[in-house]
Image (tube, rainbow, N blue to C red):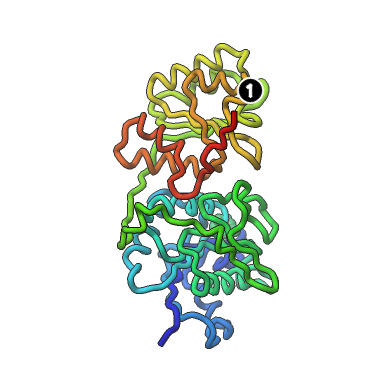
Amino acid sequence: DMKKKLLIINTGGTMGMKPTERGFRPAQGFLETQMARMPELHDETMPEFVVKEYDPVLDSANFTPLDWQRMAGDIADHYQDFDAFLLLHGTDTMAYTASALPLMLEGVDKPVILTGSQLPLCLRRNDARENLITAMIIATEFPVPEVCVYFGSRLLRGCRTTKTSTSNFDAFDSPNEPPLGLVGTHIQVFARRIRQRPPADRTQKALAVRDIRPAKLATFRLFPGVTPDVLDNVLQTPLQGMVLESYGAGNGPSNDRAFLSTLRSAVERGVTIVNLSQCQHGGVSQNDYATGRALTDVGVISGGDMTVEAAITKMMFLFSQNLSVDQVKRQMAKNLVGELSEPLTTS
Ligand code: ASP
């Protein structure tokens, strides 16, 4: 028959959690018990689906890059047998997984959708039911051949997402990329916003998994009064890369010589320092102000309009590919999978 086949991978997260004395906790098999009670999932218009549950199911706060590797591997192992993939995932680190997977799933041309919920399926009030059902429908009825997050009322490009609310049902946003779809009484997916694969990888037939391994990375957020000795401590060996969360369009305290020389020495030691903005919207444009230009001068590179999640996972990915520091820096500035807007340079 013509039914689409969907693989649902339950990695854990609130959707399938149980209320306990210590708060919501993952429970093996619990989600499937709930799902079995939902006749709507077996409506004839719904796709054929298989649920593969991880053991143990985890709160996503416990995920590491090894879990991303496992997810990518499982998608690849089942790639030929299913039309689409749905990852049920906790919201806490969903944006990191959604940023890592597009880099790892080279040549992906089937929908890979991540969803989860703010309240578990077992509660009388929850957002889990709607997220689960709509994500199942989008994955199998809309041609979105990329890694996305469906959450609340929006379909978002995975590598552009960030969790913006601890409690709203619209918990995710992609501040520098318009939603790929909007959901209300109708499901709308905007075909023109779906990523066109570059001609080079359109010739690639099979999905290839590229590895990611943990790397020695840090994020460091500037604030007025930040002291260079603290920054210097973080930048010491074995640090490989740092995301520097600067002000506005990518500015820092350029009158502070110790601050600048701390950064310069780290760059000279081979640390990759990527400048991102503390602003939720927009990106770094390091040469707009002298205070940003000072960072360029000491060898800090611009992360453009990437999210912190995208920049961290991308650095980790690149450091896993046996590249030189220079190659890593060059790749950081390039749009690899839709995570970065190519610089809009005028004048
Ligand atoms: N702590 C939970 C998790 O990330 C939150 C959620 O799923 O919404 O697994």
Q: Secondary structure at mark 1?
A: loop
| Quadrant where ligand 1 appears | bottom right
Q: Is residue 279 left or right of residue 83?
A: right
Q: Which of the image's four quarters has the C terminus?
A: top right
Residue positioned 29% across, 38% down in the render: 322
Quarter of image, res 76 = bottom left
- How many marks do you count on the picture? 1
Residue at (55% x, 43% y) in the render: 307
Is 269 rendered above or below residue 180? above
**Horizontal side of residue 346 vs 236, given as left or right:** right
Nearest the eye: 97 or 280:
280
Residue 69 visible in image? no
Amino acid type assigned to the residue bearing label 1 in the image: Tyr
- Residue 274's x, y, as percent? 49, 31
**Residue 34's spot in the image, x, y percent?**
55, 77
Residue at (42% x, 77% y) in the render = 5
- Quarter of the image with the N terminus in it: bottom left
* Residue furthest out toward the front: 347
**Does residue 250 appear in the picture of this structure?**
yes
**Residue 298 in the image, given as x and y percentages of width and height:** 49, 18
Q: Residue at x 49, y 22 (%)?
A: 233
Is residue 124 found left or right of 160 in the rendered image? right
In the depicted structure, whether residue 241 falls above or below residue 15: above
Few, some or many residues within 10 Å of mark 1 (<14, 14–19, 20+): few
Judge by depth and name the residue closer to the eye, 222 or 5: 5
Q: x%, y% of residue 188? A: 62, 68
**Residue picked out by circle 1:** 289
